[in-house]
Image (spheres, rainbow, N blue to C red):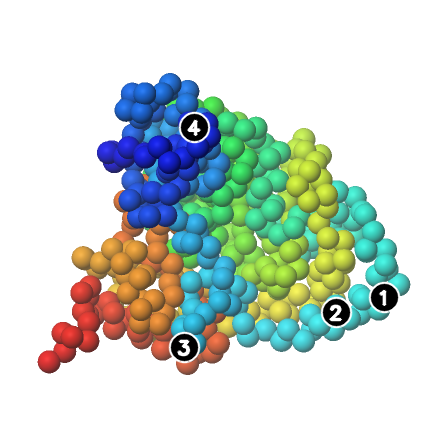
């Protein structure tokens, strides 16, 4: 536990806000670092001479601001700095920097077909209609196109099962909003998509990371969480898991589904990267359709700027999902919904996806070749790899040194829920480099850095 005592004499206002302000100041100043465990409510109250309720309000305010994360049974921890969670500023690069930090849509597709469809929709007879208010769950023809896009052999989706959302991230949010209320307990893999942390904070949910192995969250950890707490939902990414790129086995899916059914816990499945492949196993939610919320988006497969996603929900929850859409953004944009539907109907979306998939296969092959001999997870056709670092590298130190050498990668902290020691690994994305040559250069720099080890500088060279 960190021996932190805030300096409050220079901060005016209510004591709970002053404590939160002092916490923010000390994080910004480097006195507190990500992962530091703060004093208990009772200990800090005794130190400052305030009530336990005052400290509880202060910690709640700090968590609302994203400064801390409360973990059941373990305490309150300083959160990962927001700059580490901002994984999508891939266009902001210094000259010569090779960006491998975020996962934008893979290049390589003929995006001219997207422009053609946009022009056709804009000049069509329904263009002005798409500028007006529409139903909160999306027009039926847009939902039908989404159902056609999602459906595949062994998995048929009907239009009435779908709700349109403003992307997959928004889809996860409205699914959770339909299931939970503030203060509820939800669980996820201890290594997972960073957005779930921000959504939990936004919705006021208590998020717990489950113990895991290479196949994902452990069923016994899930069962333990269900027995210990009134757990409402499991969030999971079983296909092309972010950040490892691995796909969960059928046995693990069945084991998790069995626990969910036993305790009546909903499953929110994010299949953003699995949809890029189109040949992955059937959704985990098909094993428990009465509890399953299946979420996909068009960002990785077609175009991020469309901001269109789909939620397949159980019948009893569909109206609640629609109400969550209505409350959060009124409706998914009908104009981009129409463009997306026309992309699907015309076959252009499938054409773009095939191009992106082909490029992902090629780039992942380049990455596996350049980093041969090092320890990493990288599925064929993945958008990224999970690079495990040899001793004595630490994740943040490796990322900082890589940035000094001109390569941006993501340290492990943003992906971790519950574990307070950073995993010695980084995520390396293949999409941002302009071409295969830049990708190879970036990977070669990382390989050289791995070989040299920490502490190597030009001054070491005789």
Instruction: Decide which of tag 3 and tag 2 comes sooner along the chain.
Output: 3
Mark 1 surroundings: few (<14), some (14-19) or many (≥20) residues within 10 A = few
Q: Residue furthest right?
A: 125
Query: What distance separates the C-alpha of mark 4 from that of mark 2?
Result: 54 Å
Query: What distance separates the C-alpha of mark 4 from that of mark 3?
Result: 46 Å
Q: Nearer the viewer, residue 7 or 407?
A: 7
Q: Quadrant of residue 12?
A: top left
Query: What distance separates the C-alpha of mark 2 from that of mark 1?
Result: 10 Å
Mark 3 surroundings: few (<14), some (14-19) or many (≥20) residues within 10 A = few
Which residue carries the number 2 mark?
117
Which residue carries the number 4 mark?
16
Q: Nearer the viewer, residue 392 or 94?
A: 94
Measuring from the top left, give residue 215's x and y in whole percent: 37, 47
Instruction: Decide which of tag 2 and tag 1 comes sooner along the chain.
Output: 2
Q: Is residue 229 left or right of residue 38?
A: right
Evaluate whether residue 255 shows in this view: no
């Amino acid at each position: 536990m960190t021996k932190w005592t805030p300096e409050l004499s220079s901060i005016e206002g209510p004591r709970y806000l002053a404590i939160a302000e002092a916490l923010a100041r000390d994080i910004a100043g480097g006195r507190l670092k990500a992962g530091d465990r703060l004093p208990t409510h009772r200990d800090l109250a005794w130190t400052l001479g305030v009530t336990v309720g005052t400290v509880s309000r202060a910690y709640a305010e700090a968590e609302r601001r994203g400064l801390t994360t409360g973990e059941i049974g373990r305490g309150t921890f300083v959160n990962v700095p927001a700059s580490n969670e901002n994984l999508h500023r891939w266009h902001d690069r210094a000259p010569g920097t090779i960006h491998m930090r975020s996962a934008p849509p893979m290049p390589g597709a003929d995006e001219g077909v997207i422009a053609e469809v946009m022009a056709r929709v804009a000049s069509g007879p329904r263009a002005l209609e798409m500028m007006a208010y529409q139903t909160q769950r999306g027009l039926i023809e847009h939902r039908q196109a989404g159902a056609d896009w999602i459906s595949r052999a062994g998995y048929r989706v009907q239009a009435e099962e779908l709700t349109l959302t403003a992307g997959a991230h928004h889809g996860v949010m409205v699914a959770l909003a339909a299931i939970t209320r503030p203060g509820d307990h939800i669980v996820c893999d201890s290594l997972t998509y960073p957005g779930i942390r921000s959504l939990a904070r936004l919705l006021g949910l208590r998020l717990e990371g489950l113990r895991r192995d290479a196949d994902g969250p452990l069923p016994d950890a899930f069962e333990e969480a269900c027995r210990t707490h009134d757990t409402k939902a499991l969030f999971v990414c079983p296909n092309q898991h972010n950040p490892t790129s691995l796909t969960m086995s059928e046995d693990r899916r069945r084991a998790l589904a069995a626990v969910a059914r036993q305790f009546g816990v909903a499953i929110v499945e994010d299949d953003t990267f699995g949809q890029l492949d189109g040949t992955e196993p059937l959704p985990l939610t098909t094993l428990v359709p009465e509890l399953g919320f299946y979420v996909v988006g068009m960002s990785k497969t077609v175009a991020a700027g469309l901001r269109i996603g789909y939620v397949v929900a159980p019948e009893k929850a569909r109206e609640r999902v629609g109400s969550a859409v209505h409350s959060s953004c009124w409706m998914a944009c009908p104009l981009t919904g129409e463009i997306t539907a026309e992309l699907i109907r015309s076959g252009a979306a499938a054409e773009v996806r095939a191009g992106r998939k082909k490029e992902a296969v090629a780039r992942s092959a380049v990455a596996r070749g350049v980093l041969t001999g090092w320890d990493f997870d990288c599925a064929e056709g993945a958008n990224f790899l999970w690079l495990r670092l040899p001793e004595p590298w630490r994740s943040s130190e490796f990322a900082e040194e890589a940035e000094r050498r001109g390569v941006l990668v993501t340290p492990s902290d943003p992906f971790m829920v519950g574990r307070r020691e950073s995993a010695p690994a980084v995520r390396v994305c293949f999409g941002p480099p302009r071409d295969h040559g830049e990708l190879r250069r970036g990977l070669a720099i990382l390989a050289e850095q791995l070989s040299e080890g920490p502490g190597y500088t030009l001054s070491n060279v005789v």
